[in-house]
Amino acid sequence: MSVFFVIFGLKMRGRIGRDEAMALWEIQDMNTLSSMATQIRKSINGDSVFYNRNFHLEPSNVCIHRCKFCSYRRECDTETGAWTMNIQEIKDYCNEKYEPGMTEVHIVGSVHPGKDYTYYYSVIEAVREVLPSDVAIKAFSAVEIDDMSKSSEKSIQEILSDLKYRGVAALPGGGAEIFAPEIRKQICPDKANGDRWLEIHKTAHNIGMRSNATMLFGHIESRAHRIDHMIALRDLQDKTGGFDAFIPLLYKAANNPMSHLGEASFIEILKTFAISRVVLDNIPHIKSYWPMLGKKLCQLSLLYGADDIDGTINDSTKIYSMAGSGEKNPNMTAGDLERIAAGCGYKAVERDSFYNKVTKKL
Ligand code: SF4
């Protein structure tokens, strides 16, 4: 299928199918891809680039799973580089990282072999106790929720409802990786599969929780796997409307069993952003996560469909620095984020977790 027909199809129908999406990869002129993605992002988000003031909490990195792309996990608490916070440490950490004006704490970690759902419930209760009520708790990947369900014999809906009752406002998008079973079998065979991930997010949406969706790309998956992943998300979004943002996560190659693969090229990364903006016509935001991409590539991605650059972070996440990101101690001020947006001719808009505009307090 020619590029002409793809662009013509986009203009005429607004939604493209799998074959048309696959044809987009063949576009060699990056200006064409940039224009296509920019036209769509402007029709949805105008000239706005969204960011928030946030910090991350990663309660532990000791994990029962053995994802081959993971540089973060440790086998047990005594291994070098392992950590597991107790409830008092979680409270102390929140008090240390919280700064006035922050609107979100983002909580993901590992599936600790010695902790069941009661620990994760206590984490949320502790965070809710110490942080102001206007700080939204975005917590736990579908993988963590799947394991809470298994360790408790509670249904997914019960776990999600319990978490919501304790203060979780939304789910982050982690654990999606690539949905294709033949890829998951090789990179993360022992955790929640793609159908389970989708079921958990569908259940969250059905009980009124918003969520994000990720895709880990640039490892052993093909471009077709990426398109199929996006279409599965688009199909669920048609049913629930519960996804706020799609986050293409670049596989980082340091310190994990797949390091020999190296990393995707800048061109492949930017194509992935642009094509996701075109395919995911019903997900309002494409997020460019700067602690993973680095600040410069994050800014460039704004010219390829991204409209959200996440948050200030306040040096609170280790997941990507352990995997070789150039952002060793990720921290940006609101002014830094605003300058990234302005450099592309966009207007930075501070948002809360639900994309409501935050009015700056003087
Ligand atoms: S990616 Fe998550 S679930 Fe997989 S090993 Fe790492 S911490 Fe565990």
Image (spheres, helix red, strand yellow):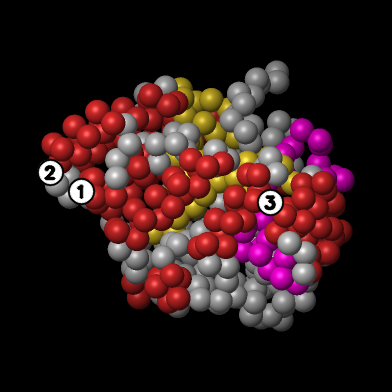
Q: Residue drawn at (34%, 53%), measured in percent from left and top? A: 227
* Residue 108 placement, left or right of 71: right
* Residue 305 placement, left or right of 198: left
Alpha-carbon span between mark 1 and mark 3: 37 Å
Q: Foreground mark, 3 or 2?
A: 2
For numbered disc 1, what is the local secondary structure? helix
| First-in-chain label (3 vs 2) | 2
Q: Which mark is residue 2?
A: 2
Alpha-carbon span between mark 3 and mark 2: 43 Å
| First-in-chain label (1 vs 3) | 1
Residue 262 at x, y percent in the picture: 33, 68
For numbered disc 3, what is the local secondary structure? strand
**Residue 89 magenta:** no
The answer to whether mark 1 is within 8 Å of ligand 1 is no
Q: Which mark is residue 139?
A: 3
Residue 66 seen in the current view: yes
**Quadrant location, the C terminus:** top right
| First-in-chain label (2 vs 1) | 2
Q: Which mark is residue 23?
A: 1
Amino acid type of the residue tagged 3 in the rendering: Ala
Residue 256 seen in the current view: no
The answer to which quarter of the image holds residue 79 is bottom right
Write down the region rendered in magenta: 128-151
Q: Residue drawn at (67%, 73%), measured in percent from left and top? A: 62
The answer to whether mark 2 is within 8 Å of ligand 1 is no
Residue 47 at x, y percent in the picture: 41, 22
Residue 190 at x, y percent in the picture: 56, 76
Amino acid type of the residue tagged 2 in the rendering: Ser
Q: Residue drawn at (52%, 62%), measured in percent from left and top? A: 195
Tell me if label 2 and label 1 are in contact, CB under 8 Å. Answer: yes
